[in-house]
Image (tube, rainbow, N blue to C red):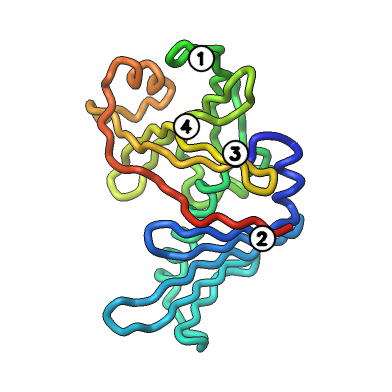
Amino acid sequence: TCNNSLSAVIFDQATIDFDFRGRHYRAIRDGGTFQYERIFTVDSSGALVRDVLTNEGLTRYINGEVVRLPSKDSAAYSSSVNSVIYYALLPYFLNDPAVQKTYLDSVSIHNQPYHKIKVTFAQTGGGKDYEDEYVYWIHRKNYTMDYLAYNYHTDGGGARFREAYQPRIIAGIRFTDFHNYEPIDQSLDVELFDRMYQQDSMKLLSEIVTENIEVVN
């Protein structure tokens, strides 16, 4: 996670590699252009798959050969690749043009002070999930993103609350892993999730662990 303007400058001209849930990811940024990659081996066949997402769209390679994809599959793979890299590198993307930020409150979580900021997205440039809502809790003294929450409307909808842990600085960029929770009552009201979290009204679903991170500028 990038936590200051210096990190953002580094990230603008960086290649970042990491592993997530058995797959390798690469993010190459050069100002406004990008290339995101996902590389993995299909267990049943041993085929090497490389998905490459750029400003122009997604291309899938299998064993080095380009494979034509139905538009539905191309959209799904694009969304999957983008989502993993988006979350791994937050809050870098929160100054994108489609981002609409609202300051909600100054709050305390476990006796630590936070800025509570809501994020929504403009329909233009906000992607297919522009109706999703996010809340970020930024430490008022350290300026670190220690918690985030979001709701979503695809696949029946739902909401998540994430707690950062295991922070580390690599080449000037702060990365963290996350405990991933959902509200016990299935609430979608992300603005209440800090309170619910402190009232033990959240159920731990999984851990979001990013491994073998390398940053090259």
Question: In 3D space, how far apart are the residues under numbered discs 2 and 1 (Cα atoms)?
Answer: 33 Å
- Report crowding for label 4: few under 14, some 14 to 19, many 20 or more residues within 10 A (C-alpha): many
Residue at x 51%, y 44% (from the top left corner): 130
Q: Quadrant of the N terminus?
A: top right
Q: Amino acid at mark 3?
A: Pro
Residue 150: quarter of image: top left
Question: Residue 14, how many percent across, how many down?
Answer: 70, 57
In the image, residue 74 above or below residue 3: below
Of the two numbered discs 3 and 2 in the rendering, the one whose residue sits closer to the viewer: 2
On screen, residue 12 versus residue 83, left or right, reads right
Label 1 vs 3, first from the N-terminus: 3
Q: Residue at x 71, y 61 (%)?
A: 33
Question: Which amino acid is tagged 4?
Answer: Leu
Instruction: Specify the label residue 7 is tagged with.
Output: none
Q: Label 1 near label 2: C-beta < 8 Å?
A: no
Assess disc 3: are there few (<14), some (14-19) or many (≥20) residues with their C-alpha within 10 Å of its C-alpha.
some
User: What residue would you read off at disc 2?
Assistant: 15
- Circle 1/circle 4 CB separation < 8 Å: no
Mark 3 residue element: loop
Nearer to us: label 1 or label 4: 1
First along the sequence among labels 3 and 2: 2
Crowding at mark 2 (Cα within 10 Å: few <14, some 14-19, many 20+) = some
Of the two numbered discs 2 and 4 in the rendering, the one whose residue sits closer to the viewer: 2
Callout 2: helix, strand or loop?
strand
Helix, strand or loop status at disc 4: strand
Secondary element under disc 1, as helix, strand or loop, is strand
User: What number is the disc on residue 148?
Assistant: 4
Residue marked by disc 3 = 91
The front one of 130 and 200 is 200
Mark 1 and mark 4: span between their CA atoms? 15 Å
